[in-house]
Every structure is written in structure tokens, then in C-alpha cells.
Image (spheres, grey):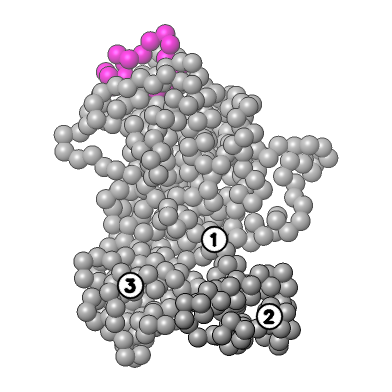
Amino acid sequence: MLRLLPSISALLQSPEGLQLSAEFGRPLATRALRQVVAEARAAVRQGAPCPSPSELLSAARRWLSATLQPSLRPVINATGVIINTNLGRAPLSAAALQAMQTVAHGYANLEYDLEAGERGSRSVHAAALLRELTGAEAALVVNNNAAAVLLTLSTLAAGREVVISRGQLVEIGGGFRVPDVMRQSGCLLVEVGTTNRTRLSDYAAAISERTALLLAVHPSNFRLTGFVESTPIGDLVRLAHDHGLLVMEDLGSGCLLPSERYGLAHEPMPQESLAAGVDVVCFSGDKLLGGPQAGIILGRAALLERIARHPLMRALRVDKLTLAALEATLRHYQRGEAEEAIPIWRMIALPLVRLQERAQRWARILQEQGLAASVRSGESTVGGGSLPGETLPTALLALVEGEVPCSLEELARRLRARPVPIVGRILRDALLLDPRTVLEEQDEELLTGLIACLRGA
């Protein structure tokens, strides 16, 4: 039986082998055939029949397709979590994608002053737009919000005390904790108040000659209810400035639109903090801003000049693609088109009737294929550590346990194994798919995947 196995050379010279070499290159085609022949040889020794050359070539093609699959690839987010950290947070607008492609295609004036004809600074890109949109004196962009906090504290408070409420010592996704960032910056953490109540008098009692600044952190990924009290940022600013100190605020999500307009609770906005007198504000670019991963630092020009000169700035700076995408995203706010052009805001603003229409269409197409599907009412969430506890009404496609040909866990696994993976959520008796977070151009791919997986393909 082992003698029946064809040689690698014979397989490569066959029409199918030549096609594999043309598609994947001869070295990879050779590697794949060696792999599948070795597996076939081991199987034959265990009593399996000898595969035909055609079967070996088909197995080699499958091996190549699996091996060359990119590790990072697009997925369809049907979870209903709009800013889904595990799925890459905010999808970018068409204009942001185009801007990235344009500057990536060739050279760009990243650090070149076109007017002066000499070296410039990458810090100028997007800074003017950020100043215009928020009223800040100056703006800097680094690679994420944790970097923004680390860099700011390292510049303004290294070796000195930073006062913060115990209720704001938050942990964000992945076990990343604000106290750890503060200590890494070299500042001395001074906790005041209690988990649920921190008054202005608590901050005042903690101020000493070693205090550098008062830090406020927006607890954007959890909510305290009941017997709680916090200090308004305006009061904190007055206290700090009376003592010749600075106030820094970490807003986390970076919301530039009034979230209450969409039936959500109010999310603090950087322009509000700056108007209240906060000296430095930090937030993310890829959460409620709807842009690329970035950390944005806004505030007084003199302070940001110091921050820009810190040695860490070079280690934390962003590249031309991030700056291009960020500028394009900010242009949507400048033009008043963020709700239509930025995907996360378009999802947040989607009316319930439109979601019902899409879910009903999905169910109807599946039913026409003889597959069980129904529509349920449900809720979407903003996610990404933003607006905790806030939900938006939605319509869900429901694939119910017992009505599908396999377990819900197996169905979810099949959907994730698709060439374009589909990620939903299992709740009690059904696998649920939320149209709010599925881009409309993904509808046909979603339906093709559902039909194939429900039929066991």
C-alpha cells in the first residue's frame, strides 16, 4: 500500500500540482504535499486505504488555505456590542480608510514642513482639528489612552503626589489598572475618600507641599448606584487652582457628541471638561470618537509643550496611518456628518424600525430555505468601557435550541469557522444575531454563512 503513494515530484508535475505551484508558489506547494503525503503514510501504516493523487492534491490545497489564513482578519460582529474591544473596537469610516490608503501608497509629509521646506513635527497633524472641535489650547496624539495618561503623569507629576478618589481607581479590560499606570509614571499615589463617596473636603485634606495635581478618572466601564457621592469637576478645578495645582482628567471614551440625544445617559465630553477649567484631558480615539486606536491629550499649551518634549513621547508616538485615519474621522465632526459617516454613531442612531426590517428579512430568507428562524426584541449595548448599563432597543434574529440541527455551541463554532467568521451571542435557549452591529454590506455574507452552517456545511 505504501508503494502506491505517488512521489512528490509526480504530484507537482500533475495538472493540479502545477496549478498549486502557480497559485501558492512551488516552495509552499512542495511543503504542503510533503505534509499530506507524510500524514497519508502514517495513516496507511495504521490500516487506512491509500489515498488517490487527486485526494492528496485536494488535501494539500486545504492545508495551504488553512496555513496561509491571516491571523488577523475581518469578522462579522453580530453580538450587538457596538464598541467591541475583542473585535477591534470602532470600525473606521470610508473616508478614514481612504485616507490611510492614500498616505500608505507612497511618501507623505509626516515630519516635513512643506511651506518651510525643512523638517517639521508629526504632532501638528490633527492638532488643529482637535483644538477647533474641543476649544483646547493645544493637542497631542499618542498610541492609546493608557499611553496618554502615563506620558502626562510622567511629565507633570514624577516624584510628586497625585490625589485621586478611591472610587476612581478603575481596572479596564485585560487587567489593566489605573493605579499601576500611575506608579509606573513615577508619581506617588494618594487615595482619598471611599469607594462610594468622595467629597471635596477629602481632596482638600490630602493636599500637601508635595502635591503635583488632582486626578479625576471617569469610571466609564462600571456604575455605582445607591449611597454614592462624587465631586463635580468644576469644584475640583477651583480647589486645585486655589492651591496653585493642576487638574488632570482621564475621560476614557472621548465622546464629542451629546449621547443623551440618542436615548442614552450623558457621557462627559472633553469640551465640557476644558470649559470647566481642567488643565489636561486624556481620552481614546477608538471608542466613542469612532476613529483609530490613539490616545488624545488636550489642554493648556504650556503644559502640552512640556509633555511633547518628554523622552517617552518618541516611544509612544503614532504613525502616519493612525494620523491619517484620525484626521479623516475628525473631519466628519467638523462637517456635522458624524452620525451618518462614522460607523459607531450610525449604529447608535439606527431607528428600531430599520433594525426590525433587517432582522425580519434575515428570518424570511432562512425560512424560505426551510430553516427555522424567528425575530425577538432585545437590547444592544455601546460597549468598549463606555456608558455602562446603558442599552438601545433592537430586533434580534433568534436560532432556537431544538429547532436547529445541532447544539447552539456547535452552531456558534461553525459560524466562527467560516472564511468570514460570524460572531453572535448565546442567551438561554437561542443563538442571537443583532443587525445593529452588522454592517449592511455584510448582510449577504451573513446569510450565506447561516444557511451553510445550519445545513451542516
**Residue at position x 54%, y 60% in the image:** 72
Q: Name the kind of residue labelled 3 in the image.
A: Glu
* Count of marks placed on residues: 3
Q: Where is the N terminus found, in terms of image quarters?
A: bottom right
Q: Give the percent coordinates (x, y) of residue 67.
A: 58, 67
**Is 201 included in the stretch rendered in magenta?**
yes
Q: Name the kind of residue labelled 2 in the image.
A: Ser
Label for residue 410? 3
Q: Which residues are magenta?
A: 199-214
Of the image marks 3 and 1, the number of the one nearer the N terminus: 1
For the question of whether residue 12 can be seen, the reply is no
Q: Name the kind of residue labelled 1 in the image.
A: Ser
**Residue at position x 71%, y 77% in the image:** 21
Q: Where is the C terminus found, in terms of image quarters?
A: bottom left
Label for residue 71? 1
Between the C-alphas of marks 2 and 3, the distance is 39 Å
Label for residue 7? 2
Between the C-alphas of marks 1 and 2, the distance is 32 Å
Within 10 Å of disc 2 (Cα), the crowding (few <14, some 14-19, many 20+) is few
**Is 402 included in the stretch rendered in magenta?**
no
Q: Which element is circle 2 on?
A: loop
